Amino acid sequence: MAWSAGIVCIGLIAAGASLAEHSLLVTAGVLLGAAAVWFPGYWLLSRSCYYLSPTKAGFRDAFQTREVRFDEVQSVTISAGRFSNNLIFTCLGETVFIAVDPVDETWFTAVKAELQRRRIPIITTVAGFRIG
C-alpha cells in the first residue's frame, strides 16, 4: 500500500511539473516510467507468504525464506516492540526470527494455537521485559 502511494505521488508531481513545462508526450513518458517502476516493485513485495502445515511454519518472500519445524522447536518468544512484533523460535541448532504481519494476524493466531497444542513454551516480552 505504501509502495503504491509513493509511486502515485511521484507520478502526480512529475506529471504536473511536466505539463507545466513540456509537452503531453513527455508527461506520458514520465507516467509510463512511474508505472514501469511501480509494477515490478508491487509484484515483488506482494509475493510474501506466511504458511503453516502440520509439521512446519514459516515465511517466504522474494528475498528470503524462514522456516521452522515444530519437532525441532524448544521454545518461542513473542517479542512485542513499539512498532513491530517478532516470533523468535529457539530450535535445536539455530534461532529463527519471523516478523509478524501487523495487519493480518491470522497466521500468528494459528501458529500460537499449534504451539500450545504441542505444549511448546511461549514467552512474551514487551520492550525487553518478560511478561508472565
Image (cartoon, helix red, strand yellow):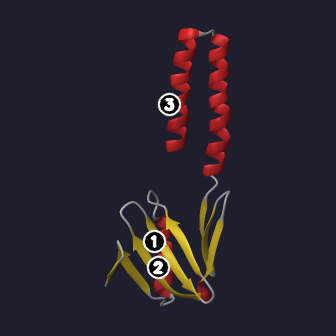
Amino acid type at mark 2: Ala
On the image, numbered disc 2 is attached to which residue?
A: 113
Specify the quadrant of the image occupied by residue 49: bottom right
Q: Position of residue 21 (x, y in %)?
A: 56, 10
* Tag 3–tag 2 contact (CB < 8 Å): no
Q: CA distance from mark 1 to mark 2?
A: 6 Å
SS for tag 2?
A: helix
In the rendered image, the quadrant that contains the C terminus is bottom left
Q: Could you tell me which residue is drawn at 52 percent across and 24 percent down?
A: 12
Task: Tell me if 78 is positioned left or right of 43 in this view.
Answer: left
Task: Tell me if 100 is positioned left or right of 33 in this view.
Answer: left
Q: Earlier in the sequence, mark 3 or mark 2?
A: 3
Q: Nearer the viewer, residue 42 or 54?
A: 42
Q: Is residue 129 visible?
A: yes
Q: Give the label on residue 109, or none.
A: 1
* Tag 1–tag 2 contact (CB < 8 Å): yes
Q: Position of residue 80 (x, y in %)?
A: 38, 70
Q: Nearer the viewer, residue 89 or 116?
A: 89
Please tell me whether residue 17 is drawn above or below residue 98 in the rendered image. Answer: above
Q: Could you tell me which residue is drawn at 49 percent across and 74 percent down?
A: 87
Amino acid type at mark 3: Cys
On the image, numbered disc 3 is attached to which residue?
A: 9
Q: Position of residue 73 (x, y in %)?
A: 56, 86
* Tag 3–tag 1 contact (CB < 8 Å): no
Please tell me whether residue 68 is drawn above or below residue 99 in the rendered image. Answer: below
Q: CA distance from mark 3 to mark 2?
A: 41 Å
Q: Position of residue 11 (x, y in %)?
A: 56, 27
Q: Residues within 10 Å of mark 2 (few under 14, many from 20)?
A: few
Q: Is residue 1 visible?
A: no
